């Protein structure tokens, strides 16, 4: 990996191949498990830096779009190789900056490796179609064409994986990039960008630019810049809605991956031990800070009591702490705002009459002095039988899940579908009929059947959701459709004027 810019703590933006400081202030990235540790100091950029990055990307575009697609792919293959070499270092950095345990951080890095290799493989399969014309001596075909400058805005919960979902296909398709990473995980973003440079992008200044800072100060100017052709965003539905309106008014292409209120259905024929483990992982992996987290557990009334007993016991036994320590299952929330949000939702739950089964509060200094300098919240299970409660309708993004009963499969599917989101659903059953009905009727972009949770997407399949989760685009397999446009080409070699539909009646 390339060495960090300047001092170990102070970092810079990447604009036109140069590491550049911002005109304004800097902000700190701190370890959410131990906030005394400063991971790095990063430029709090604004419109000036955003505009410079867009202009650099615009200037680099004419040359980059003509680089053969397999040559672009070779850079991504090399980046995957470098990440594999640096995996331990990247894993450690991610756990320190984002908070999830080492196993999960390693999985995040592996996902970026997989995505770069998968998208690179498409460099030899960058196919269009050929077809016959309705007229004689005429040929028809399609090609994928790049869009121009792509503004990519990513979240903190998968700080290397999600940037890879966007940057790799954007580059492969021939776009140039301005990357705005989350302000909570800028060091991870910089590490990924440096790997891409080392893999060969350093020979193409301006193709990949990175501007640190906050959404209103960096993200919004990028979205509204007239030279940005497309925007790809992963984050909250509220911000996504604003981006959609801004892009639509300027006729920009945009891809949105937003919130979720995902449900796992546990049927009466489920293996309860498997069900408990799957639901625990779906609810509390990454401290519940996943758009695919299982924040609703819909359990058949015949097994409700036994499942609830076992699930609460498993949750209460969760090993919470600094993710760098061996055996830790759940780390901290990302920042103080996230912790305060969960605390507010616990008050909402109490006001709604929700029954607290375990957790429900941060750790006190007296019970866990080792967690006193981090943003830790007890893994929480609620009994919330009314599916219309706010606690069952709104995304909390933390280690909280609610159990609710269902009379039968039809009732469970009705409850699962009764939210404004539609990202991921799961059904735990041994009955093939249950599984087939769930596959057909659950309203979500992703459905898991068997002994699965709502998490576990694989890079070579489409990723995205319905309703307020997204705007119809898909990442993974669908990413090439986001970052390219189809161009239809006609070649008439008849030597005469031919008119489709008119001369062929």
Image (cartoon, rainbow, N blue to C red):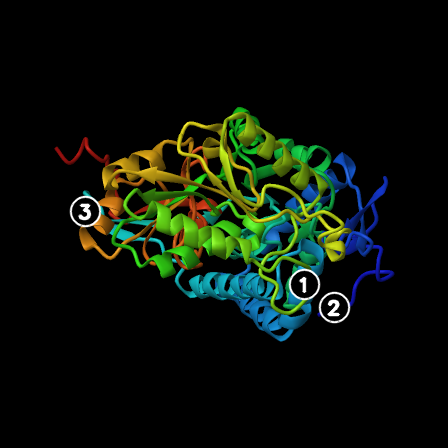
In percent of width and height, residue 467 lies at 40, 33
Kindly identify which numbered label has been placed on residue 197: 1
Count of numbered badges drawn on the protein: 3
Q: Secondary structure at mark 2?
A: loop
Mark 1, other Cα within 10 Å: few <14 / some 14–19 / many ≥20: many
- Quadrant in which residue 277 is drawn: bottom left
Name the foreground residue: 102 vs 45: 102
Label 3 belongs to which residue?
Answer: 136
**Residues marked 1 and 2 touching at CB (< 8 Å):** yes
Q: Secondary structure at mark 1?
A: helix
In percent of width and height, residue 158 lies at 58, 53
Compare marks 1 and 2 and give the one earlier in the sequence.
Answer: 2
For residue 279, say whether it is visible. Answer: no
* Horizontal arrangement in the rendering, residue 425 relative to residue 246 (left or right): left
Q: Quadrant of the N terminus?
A: bottom right
Rounded to the nearest angstrom, the CA distance separating label 1 from label 3 is 49 Å
Nearest-to-viewer mark from 1 and 2: 2
Nearest-to-viewer mark from 1 and 3: 1
* Horizontal arrangement in the rendering, residue 83 relative to residue 504 (left or right): right
Mark 2, other Cα within 10 Å: few <14 / some 14–19 / many ≥20: few
Query: 1 above or below 370?
Result: below
């Amino acid at each position: 990996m390339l060495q960090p810019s300047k001092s170990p703590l102070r970092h810079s933006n990447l604009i036109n191949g140069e590491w550049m400081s911002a005109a304004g202030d800097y902000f700190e990235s701190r370890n959410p498990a131990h906030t005394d540790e400063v991971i790095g100091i990063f430029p709090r950029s604004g419109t000036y830096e955003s505009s410079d990055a867009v202009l650099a990307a615009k200037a680099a575009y004419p040359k980059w779009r003509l680089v053969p697609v397999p040559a672009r792919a070779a850079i991504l293959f090399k980046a995957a190789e470098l990440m594999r070499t640096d995996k331990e270092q990247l894993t450690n950095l991610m756990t320190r900056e984002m908070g999830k345990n080492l196993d999960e951080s390693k999985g995040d890095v592996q996902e970026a490796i997989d995505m770069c290799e998968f998208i690179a493989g498409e460099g030899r399969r960058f196919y269009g179609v050929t077809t016959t014309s309705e007229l004689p001596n005429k040929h028809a075909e399609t090609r994928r064409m790049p869009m121009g400058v792509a503004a990519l805005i990513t979240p903190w919960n998968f700080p290397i994986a999600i940037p890879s979902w966007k940057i790799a296909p954007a580059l492969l398709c021939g776009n140039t990039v301005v990357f705005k990473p989350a302000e909570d995980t800028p060091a991870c973003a910089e590490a990924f960008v440096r790997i891409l440079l080392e893999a060969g992008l350093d020979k193409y200044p301006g193709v990949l630019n990175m501007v640190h800072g906050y959404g209103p100060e960096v993200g919004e100017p990028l979205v509204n810049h007239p030279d940005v052709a497309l925007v790809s965003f992963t984050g909250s539905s509220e911000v996504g809605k604003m981006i959609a309106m801004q892009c639509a008014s300027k006729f920009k292409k945009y891809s949105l991956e937003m919130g979720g209120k995902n449900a796992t259905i546990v049927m009466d024929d489920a293996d309860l031990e498997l069900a408990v483990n799957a639901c625990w992982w779906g609810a509390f992996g990454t401290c519940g800070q996943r758009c695919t987290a299982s924040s609703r557990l819909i359990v058949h009334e015949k097994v409700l009591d036994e499942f609830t007993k076992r699930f609460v016991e498993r949750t209460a036994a969760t090993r919470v702490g600094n993710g760098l320590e061996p055996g830790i299952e759940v780390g901290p929330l990302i920042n103080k705002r996230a912790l305060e949000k969960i605390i507010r939702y616990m008050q909402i739950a109490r006001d709604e009459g929700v029954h607290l089964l375990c957790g429900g509060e941060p750790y006190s200094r007296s019970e866990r002095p080792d967690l006193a300098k981090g943003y830790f919240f007890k893994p929480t299970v609620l009994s919330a039988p009314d599916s219309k409660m706010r606690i069952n309708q709104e995304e909390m993004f933390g280690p909280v899940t609610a159990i609710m009963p269902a009379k039968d499969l039809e009732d469970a599917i009705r409850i699962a579908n009764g939210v404004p989101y539609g990202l991921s659903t799961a059904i735990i059953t041994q009955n093939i009929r249950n599984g087939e009905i769930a596959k057909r009727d659950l309203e979500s972009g992703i459905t898991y059947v068997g002994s699965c949770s709502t998490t576990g997407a694989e890079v070579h399949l489409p990723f995205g959701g319905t309703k307020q989760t997204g705007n119809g685009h898909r990442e993974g397999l669908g990413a090439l459709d986001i970052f390219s446009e189809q161009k239809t080409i006609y070649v008439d070699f008849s030597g005469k004027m031919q008119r489709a539909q008119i001369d062929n009646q």
